[in-house]
Amino acid sequence: MKRVGFAPQWLLVTLGVLVVGFATLHARASAIEQRKNWPSDVDELYLPPVAVISRASLGHTELMSDLIAVRSNIYFGEQISTKGAQKWLLYYVNAATELDPYFQPIYLRGAVMLVYNGNAFSLETFRNAERILEKGTHYFPNDWNIWFQLGFNRAFEMTKLVPPNSETYRHLKTDGVEALRRATLFDGVPGHVVNLVGTMLTKGGQRDLAIEHLKRIYASTTDPEVRQQLRNQLKSLLGEQYKDGFKGEAESLQTVVESRYPYAPESFSIILGSRGVAPFAVLKDAAAPVTESTR
């Protein structure tokens, strides 16, 4: 009786194995057939989701970000030489910044590669670059290069892709000038950038804002060449009688720096305030002129 009961079970198991084996072989053959139509470079270019890469890195996310950044540079060059579509580039750049958001160079370099890659400009491409740059300003708010590129894209490049009398055009122009203005508030910005922003503010009918902007930069810079350029612009905006009206601001700045943090860049004294004030307590307006209330 036990043999009679065992035979059907054995047959069912055998039949099940055969069915599974047949289904597996069929699925394999179907996958191989479908794979013939895939692009030849998919295996080389595919990148898993960032969450998977992060877990696979075993905590070494910065290393994985570096490797992806290197791969994006190689991919970018290959696509340039073959006039490719750069369809994987945005994914690479996003992955690199997600794995290591403090990888500073990738923001500017990635945004530039996304736009200037040999293909025709499009608003979508600039929007992708804009999001990368905005993320960069979040993690590196004092990097004038990122702010400048963001403002340049908006004010000069993206405005060419929308109707000149549209609301989108006006927003892009305004936001672009504001990003450029913020770029001039940090140490190391070239004088021609300051001149550019002042000119754009004036042409945009924002004369008072242009004057205030130039005054603030003049008060916070120690570069003689930049000061001279600023003085010339202020002269044209305010008139001959005001050309030397802000010379004392530079002397005041030097006095404040010597009394606060003479061993650090000038911006430390402006941002951190006097030694008796808690650090970062006056970050609300880092570029404000030095007055009696801030000394």
Image (cartoon, grey):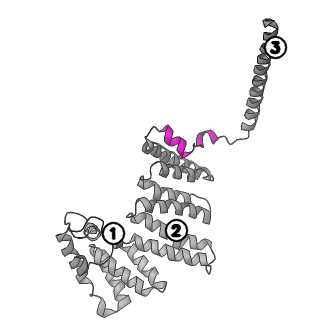
- Taking the magenta stretch, the answer to whether it contains residue 57 is no
* Residue 31 picture location, percent across and down: 73, 34
**Circle 1 SS class:** helix
Task: Look at the image and tell me in which quarter the N terminus lies.
Answer: top right
Q: Is residue 47 above or below residue 251?
A: above
Distance, label 2 to label 1, CA atoms, is 27 Å
* Residue 236 picture location, percent across and down: 37, 88
Disc 2 versus disc 1: nearer the observer: 1
- Taking the magenta stretch, the answer to whether it contains residue 48 is yes
For label 1, the crowd category at 10 Å Cα-Cα, with few meaning under 14, some 14 to 19 and many 20 or more, is few
To which residue does mark 3 refer?
8
Distance, label 2 to label 3, CA atoms, is 74 Å
Asked whether disc 1 touches disc 3, contact meaning CB atoms under 8 Å apart, the reply is: no
To which residue does mark 2 refer?
153
Task: Look at the image and tell me in which quarter the C terminus lies.
Answer: bottom left
Q: Is residue 106 left or right of residue 261?
A: right
* Residue 207 picture location, percent across and down: 43, 87
